[in-house]
């Protein structure tokens, strides 16, 4: 039996990697929570099993999780589990990579700085670097986060960390495949908990997609419907720029119009027209091999966003904008220069301004810098600086 040690037990991994791996069978998964013990506490009382409420398909018990370890309490146990794992995977969100706007590990970040001093470890990067410096068998490190070249970014972060911490890593026994992951997974509501009779239930759509670079250091589960490819980039750009890009636009434009959910924002004709235009403009920047998929993919995305039963909250998507905008809007804008993408960046800027003026704190690792930027004299330029978009100032600010 193979083993996965997975960092980040939010709803997304419980609806995606764990669901796929449960379908494959023959593997077990140990979860690691870097911060809160909430998911561990909730799942421990039910043997780490939970219900996946797959829309239109019914309730699916997921029984593949063996245990959840918490970084602050179980560091040694985590390192021991990692040492025998075939795959170390992660869904720690964009900010869990601690990369600066130039794509380098942010050595001044307080969690990274703490990990560089040594134990106890707090970050995914610190755990992986320490594991790789001591392990004696091959391992695949599989990022399942929404980032461009997520595997390569993670490798870079770990390499920067190892250099700064003077850890020697044998890179020949590790692979960091890039991967595109997709499944819309809203936060759990009381209604879902009641329907599933499970306080830890996870609601998700029936659609799921996973495209992984075929670069593993050892075995992997026989995941059904996963596409193994030489180059993930066209697939990840399609998904990140079109789906996630439109999502972020809907979040900022929708919240400012007083909507709470994706299906509400997308049914407002003005917002819908713009979201669709954004998808098409983003689609025009994609590599040739996926460009012919754009019309059908756009249609399919609109249908997924229309789904009222998902009850996908816009404020969930609006979080961490400083981490999301670079790959959702900025790269697209650099490659396409579309007026719609300019509007999308401007929607984020106005959202930041409105929230700050209302005294509502932003949920963003750069909330402080954003508030300072908003309150500064040249606030628009300063906001672009926070997201590493100074080069785009002439395009965006005109
Ligand atoms: C969303 C994503 O919260 C967000 O920012 O855009 O979580 C999105 O639902 C997933 O990437 C879909 O696969």
Image (tube, rainbow, N blue to C red):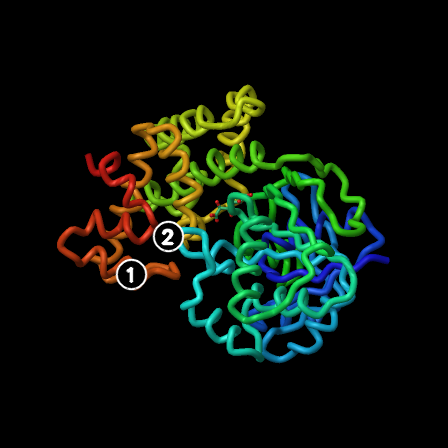
Q: Is residue 63 visible?
A: no
- Asked whether 175 or 219 is in front, the reply is 175
x then y, percent, for residue 250? 39, 40
- Quarter containing the N terminus: bottom right
- Asked whether 174 or 309 is in front, the reply is 174
Figure check: 113 above or below 332: below
Residue 212 is marked as none
To which quarter of the image does residue 158 belong?
Answer: bottom right
- Label 2 sits on a secondary structure element that is helix
| 383 with respect to 282 (left or right) | left
To which quarter of the image does residue 337 belong?
Answer: top left
| 282 with respect to 131 (left or right) | left
* Mark 1 Cα shell of 10 Å, populated few (<14), some (14-19), many (≥20): some
- Mark 2 lies on residue: 322
Q: How many marks?
A: 2
Q: Residue at x 55, y 19 (%)?
A: 292
| 73 with respect to 369 (left or right) | right
Mark 2 or 1 closer to N-term?
Answer: 2
- Quarter containing the C terminus: top left
Q: Residue at x 63, y 42 (%)?
A: 55
Q: Is residue 72 visible?
A: yes
* Mark 2 Cα shell of 10 Å, populated few (<14), some (14-19), many (≥20): many
x then y, percent, for residue 144? 61, 50
- Mark 1 lies on residue: 369
Residues under numbered marks 2 and 1 in contact, where contact means CB atoms less than 8 Å apart: yes
x then y, percent, for residue 32? 64, 67
x then y, percent, for residue 341? 34, 33
Q: Residue at x 54, y 54 (%)?
A: 156
- Quote the CA–CA distance across marks 2 and 1: 10 Å
Figure check: 44 above or below 7: below
- Label 1 sits on a secondary structure element that is helix
């Amino acid at each position: 039996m193979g083993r996965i040690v997975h960092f980040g037990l939010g709803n997304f991994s419980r609806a995606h990697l764990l669901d796929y791996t449960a379908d494959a069978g023959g593997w077990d998964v140990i979860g690691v929570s870097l911060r809160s013990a909430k998911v561990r506490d909730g799942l421990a009382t039910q043997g780490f099993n939970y219900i996946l409420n797959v829309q239109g398909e019914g309730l699916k018990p997921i029984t593949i999780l063996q245990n959840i370890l918490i970084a602050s309490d179980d560091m040694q146990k985590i390192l021991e589990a990692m040492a025998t794992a075939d795959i170390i995977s992660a869904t720690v969100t964009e900010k869990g990579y601690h990369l600066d706007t130039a794509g380098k590990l942010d050595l001044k970040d307080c969690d990274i700085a703490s990990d560089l001093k040594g134990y106890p470890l707090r970050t995914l990067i610190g755990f992986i670097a320490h594991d790789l410096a001591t392990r004696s068998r091959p391992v695949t490190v599989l990022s399942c986060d929404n980032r461009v070249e997520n595997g390569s970014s993670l490798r870079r972060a770990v390499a920067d960390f190892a250099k700064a911490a003077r850890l020697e890593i044998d890179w020949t026994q590790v692979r960091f495949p890039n991967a595109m992951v997709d499944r819309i997974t809203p936060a759990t509501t009381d209604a879902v908990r009641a329907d599933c009779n499970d306080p830890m239930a996870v609601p998700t759509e029936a659609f799921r997609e996973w495209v992984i670079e075929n670069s593993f250091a050892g075995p992997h589960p026989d995941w059904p419907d996963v596409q193994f490819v030489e180059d993930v980039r066209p697939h990840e750009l399609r998904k990140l720029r079109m789906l996630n890009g439109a999502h972020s636009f809907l979040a900022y434009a929708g919240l400012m119009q007083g909507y709470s959910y994706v299906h509400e924002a997308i049914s407002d004709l003005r917002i819908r027209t713009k979201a669709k235009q954004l998808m098409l403009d983003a689609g025009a920047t994609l590599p040739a091999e996926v460009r012919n998929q754009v019309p059908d993919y756009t249609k399919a995305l609109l249908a997924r966003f229309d789904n009222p039963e998902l009850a996908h909250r816009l404020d969930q998507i609006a979080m961490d904008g400083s981490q999301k905008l670079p790959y959702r809007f900025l790269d697209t804008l650099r490659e396409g220069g579309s007026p719609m993408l300019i509007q999308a960046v401007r929607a984020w800027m106005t959202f930041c301004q409105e929230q700050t003026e209302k005294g509502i704190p932003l949920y963003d690792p750069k909330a402080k810098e954003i508030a300072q930027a908003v309150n500064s004299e040249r606030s628009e330029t300063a906001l672009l600086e926070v997201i590493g978009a100074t080069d785009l100032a002439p395009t965006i600010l005109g």
